[in-house]
Image: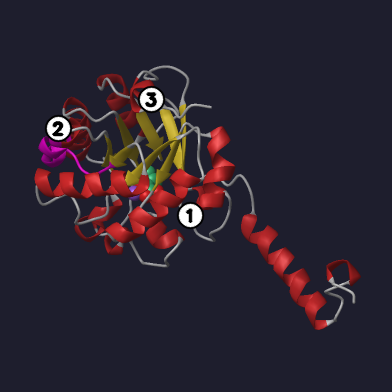
Amino acid sequence: MKRLTVPRIRQRKGGEPLVMLTAYTVRQAQLLDPHCDMLLVGDSLAQVIYGLPHTVGVTMEMMALHGAAVVRGSYHAAVIVDMPFGSYEGSPEQAFDNAARLLKETGAAAVKVEGGRVLAPTIEFLTQRGIPVMGHVGLTPQAVNILGGYGVRGKSEEEARAIVDDAVAVAQAGAFSIVIEGVLESIAIEITGKVACPTIGIGASAQCDGQVLVTDDMLGMFERVPKFVKRYQDMSGVISGAVKEYADQVRSRSFPTPDQIYAG
Ligand code: KIV
Ligand code: NA
């Protein structure tokens, strides 16, 4: 099966909803790939893989290594890699150098950056030089030190206007798609109606052109998750149960059995 391309993703505006999940490792990518249009190597790997308090600590090396693993484990989905905090905000040139490195070292199709109007010149710079960019507006976790937390965005009319203006600027700058995270539903609907590229919602609206979740959240790997996460499985319970059974069997010498032994 041929890999989904950025132009084909763009063409899905208003059509069948786009399916995106995060992936960080090769086996995870292999399991998600047949069902997804896009795999996002999210900088949420900060919390999910590395136990960091937020995404500000993520490095280019982390994104490059996990991005390469996800590309190796996928054949059908387009792979998008998050640009880590500090790798693109300084200037369009800085962003280009780091985005080019990520595409070269991973084989991914595109990068994602957080931000609105301020980043429009950078998104245009990259897009015009061969690097497809996905935008990300609303709740932008890399700005945690400015926002002070991860609460829903757009509750005041002024903030709502700013988020819509951000999304429109990012789309006009050439973003092929935009993640809308953690906003009042009316804002997500307004943006989806206004921009020409597909919107991907997370804590946004079913009317977005697609949806994304952090895979480990939807699989029930964490105790505490935001309201917008739906748990499709209790993987914590599945894993705890299996590990407890193994531990009990080791302690009672009922593992290994003759089936797992090289008799001689
Ligand atoms: O890092 C991430 O997982 C993300 C998605 C939640 C959109 O940016
Ligand atoms: Na992210």
The amino acid at mark 1 is: Val
Number of residues whose C-alpha sits closer than 10 Å to that of mark 1, classed few (under 14), some (14–19) or many (20 or more) = some
Quadrant of the image occupied by residue 30 = top right
Residue at label 1? 225
Residue of label 3:
9
Left/right placement of residue 106 relative to residue 114 reads right
Q: From the viewer's perspective, is 133 left or right of 91?
A: right
- State which tag comes first along the sequence, 1 or 2: 2
Q: Quadrant of residue 161?
A: top left
Label 3 – label 2 distance at C-alpha: 18 Å
- Is residue 37 within the magenta segment? no
Q: Marks 3/1: CA distance?
A: 29 Å
Query: From the viewer's perspective, is residue 236 above or below residue 124?
Result: below
* Res 227 seen here: no
Residue 233, given in percent of the width and then of the height, sits at 63, 48
Residue drawn at (79%, 79%), measured in percent from left and top? 250
- 10 Å crowding of disc 3: few (<14), some (14-19), many (20+): some
SS for tag 2? helix
Q: Amino acid at mark 3?
A: Ile
Residue 112 point in image, percent of width and height? 29, 42
